Image (cartoon, rainbow, N blue to C red):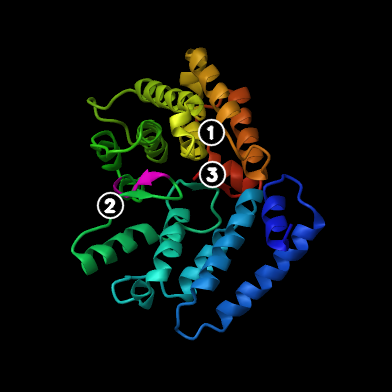
């Protein structure tokens, strides 16, 4: 096994070896040294190195958004991207979009930095350059970019209507179930961000949204046994909708069968169950459930633990 492989494998274990720590610190030092020598030229290799360091921290639930913020600052990505040199480099398209996903509001809970708004500015720059925004499915999240556009402004009051009226896109059956789960999860998450503002009389009840979310998760998990979908990794993206459903404690207490569906789903569909990231999520969700806390603030509790948890 190469040192690179060993680092990645160790990063997915809740208690990694001391060798992981040694390689990680060495890589972090080299990454920062490369950024310090930035001369205005986009170094795609350094971008990938930074994203890899973020990923190592991500599996361990260690705060990592500070590294993303550092890359954004050094490469001048904090403002408009219209005239940015990074947009002229086709090799930088994928790592830049990945940075935007990792920066997406509510995709990371307990962030130690503010959301930087990379996705929204990236899409604006693409539209200016090509007279349209890129469609299709983003490969890391398995979500359509048109749906991610809505998530990038999930804090806005208009996001719920946008999510519930999103027309969808063509895809395979597991993907469509996943997108439905994200739609309802996003609506519920947005409501939590805006608690205290009230809901229009025409808005669907929280219980209705949770029911549709649980049904979508259940349907997605059932596709795992069908060989025609073996090539898809759609269930890898279940964390976000699963967490959104589990936080609705009051509804799940009234609907214990829904809670059983969620427990079954996470048992059969969660591929990263050994990682510290998932262990911390499970601990917090169980804490909310045992306390019967329907107002559980997962961001606040993550910060108290000094962790950042990734849901994408």
Which residue shows up at 41% across the image and 22% down it? 215
Query: Few, some or many C-alpha atoms within 10 Å of disc 2 (few <14, some 14-19, many ≥20)?
Result: few
Q: Is residue 6 left or right of residue 73?
A: right
Q: Which mark is residue 296?
A: 1
Q: Which mark is residue 299?
A: 3
**Which mark sits nearer the N-terminus, 3 or 2?**
2
- Mark 3 and mark 1: Cα distance apart in space: 9 Å
Q: Percent x, y for residue 29?
A: 68, 73
Inspect the magenta stretch and tell me whether residue 59 lies in it.
no
Q: Is residue 38 left or right of residue 104?
A: right
Q: Percent x, y for residue 225?
A: 51, 25
Residue segment shown in magenta = 142-146
Q: Is residue 63 left or right of residue 87?
A: right
To which quarter of the image does residue 154 belong?
top left
- Mark 1 and mark 2: Cα distance apart in space: 35 Å
Report if residue 78 is visible in the image.
Answer: no
Mark 3 and 1 residues: CB-CB less than 8 Å, in contact?
Answer: no
To which quarter of the image does residue 118 belong?
bottom left
Q: Is residue 180 left or right of residue 306?
A: left
Q: Relative to residue 137, is residue 200 depicted above or below?
A: above
Q: Percent x, y for residue 15?
A: 76, 47
Report if residue 162 is visible in the image.
Answer: yes
At mark 2, the secondary structure is loop
**Which mark sits nearer the N-terminus, 1 or 2?**
2
Q: Which mark is residue 135?
A: 2
Which residue shows up at 63% across the image and 56% down it? 56
Q: Which mark is residue 113?
A: none
Residue in front for this viewpoint, 200 or 28: 28
């Amino acid at each position: 096994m190469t040192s690179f492989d060993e680092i990645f494998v160790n990063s997915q274990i809740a208690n990694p070896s001391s060798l992981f720590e040694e390689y990680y610190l060495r890589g972090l030092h080299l990454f920062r040294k490369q950024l310090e020598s930035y001369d205005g030229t986009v170094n795609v290799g350094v971008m990938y190195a930074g994203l890899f360091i973020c990923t190592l921290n991500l599996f361990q639930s260690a705060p990592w958004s500070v590294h993303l913020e550092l890359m954004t600052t050094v490469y001048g990505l904090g403002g408009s991207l219209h005239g940015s040199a990074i947009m002229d480099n086709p090799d930088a398209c994928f790592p830049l979009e990945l940075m935007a996903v990792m920066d997406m509001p509510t995709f990371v809970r307990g962030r130690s930095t503010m959301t930087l708004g990379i996705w929204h500015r990236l899409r604006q720059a693409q539209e200016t350059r090509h007279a349209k925004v890129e469609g299709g499915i983003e490969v890391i999240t398995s979500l359509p970019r048109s749906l991610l556009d809505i998530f990038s402004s999930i804090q806005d009051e208009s996001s719920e209507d946008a999510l519930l009226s999103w027309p969808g896109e063509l895809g395979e059956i597991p993907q469509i179930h996943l997108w439905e789960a994200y739609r309802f999860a996003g609506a519920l998450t947005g409501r939590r961000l805006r608690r205290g503002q009230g809901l229009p009389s025409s808005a669907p009840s929280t219980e209705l949204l949770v029911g549709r979310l649980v049904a979508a998760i259940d349907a997605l998990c059932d596709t795992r046994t069908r060989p025609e979908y073996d090539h898809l990794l759609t269930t890898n993206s279940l964390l976000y909708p699963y967490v959104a459903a589990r936080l609705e404690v009051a509804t799940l207490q009234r609907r214990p069968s829904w809670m059983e569906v969620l427990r079954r789903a996470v048992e059969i569909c969660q591929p990263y169950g050994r990682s510290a990231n998932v262990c911390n999520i499970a601990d917090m969700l169980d804490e909310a459930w045992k306390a019967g806390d329907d107002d559980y603030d997962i961001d606040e509790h993550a910060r108290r633990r000094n962790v950042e948890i990734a849901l994408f």
